[in-house]
Image: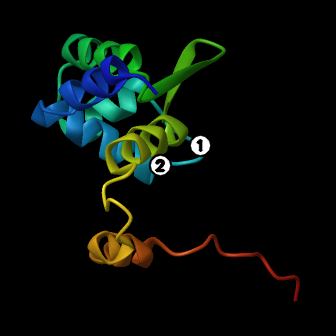
């Protein structure tokens, strides 16, 4: 990952509405949401939402997929993971205990739940 890509991603998230959009789309994974639904849930005009989604798309944090006349937007979790990994790479300088609190903070996300057949 390049510095420029991480800068674009972080810059896109420095605006409050875009951060709210990204968090909403993360919570809607893996299905994503149509742009109109994102705008409705966040009470943002459709044309303004379109601009925010474009910025997040250019930053590679959001992907879109067309379904008939609707476009569904999804958070690009791989891009998020790459950006975070880039920021944390070598953060501990060979001392993993320095990053341990951060890793512990992420642990509540936990592993994916496996469906069981009853």
* Lateral position of residue 40 relative to residue 33, left or right: left
- Residue 99, by quadrant, is bottom left
Q: Position of residue 32 (x, y in %)?
A: 52, 39
Q: Position of residue 41 (x, y in %)?
A: 27, 41
* Lateral position of residue 99 relative to residue 34, left or right: left
**Which residue is at 51% across, 24% downward?**
63
Residue 42 image label: none
**Helix, strand or loop at mark 2:** loop
Q: Front-most of 105 and 36?
A: 105
Q: Is residue 12 above or below residue 28?
A: above
Q: Are marks 1 and 2 in contact (CB under 8 Å)?
A: yes
* Lateral position of residue 7 relative to residue 118, left or right: left
Quote the CA–CA distance across marks 1 and 2.
6 Å
**Which residue is at 50% across, 42% downward?**
77
Residue under label 1, please give it: 31
Q: Position of residue 33 (x, y in %)?
A: 47, 36
* Lateral position of residue 7 relative to residue 61, left or right: left
Q: Front-most of 102 and 114?
A: 102
Q: Is residue 85 above or below residue 33?
A: below
- Residue 52, by quadrant, is top left
**Helix, strand or loop at mark 1:** loop
**Which residue is at 25% across, 24% downward?**
7
Name, please, the residue furthest toward the front.
94
Q: Front-most of 118 and 75?
A: 75
Q: Crowding at label 2, few (<14), some or many (≥20) Cα neighbours within 10 Å?
A: some
Residue under label 2, please give it: 28
**Which residue is at 21% across, 33% downward?**
13
Q: Position of residue 74 (x, y in %)?
A: 50, 34
Q: Is residue 59 above or below residue 47?
A: below
């Amino acid at each position: 990952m390049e510095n420029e890509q991480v800068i674009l991603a972080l810059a896109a998230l420095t605006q409050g509405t875009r951060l709210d959009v990204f968090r909403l789309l993360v919570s809607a994974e893996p299905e994503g949401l149509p742009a109109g639904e994102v705008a409705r849930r966040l009470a943002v005009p459709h044309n303004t939402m379109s601009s925010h989604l474009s910025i997040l798309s250019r930053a590679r944090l959001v992907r879109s997929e067309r379904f008939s006349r609707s476009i569904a937007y999804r958070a690009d979790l791989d891009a998020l993971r790459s950006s975070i990994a880039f920021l944390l790479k070598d953060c501990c300088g060979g001392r993993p205990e320095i990053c341990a609190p951060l890793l512990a903070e992420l642990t509540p996300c936990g592993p994916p739940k496996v469906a069981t057949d009853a």
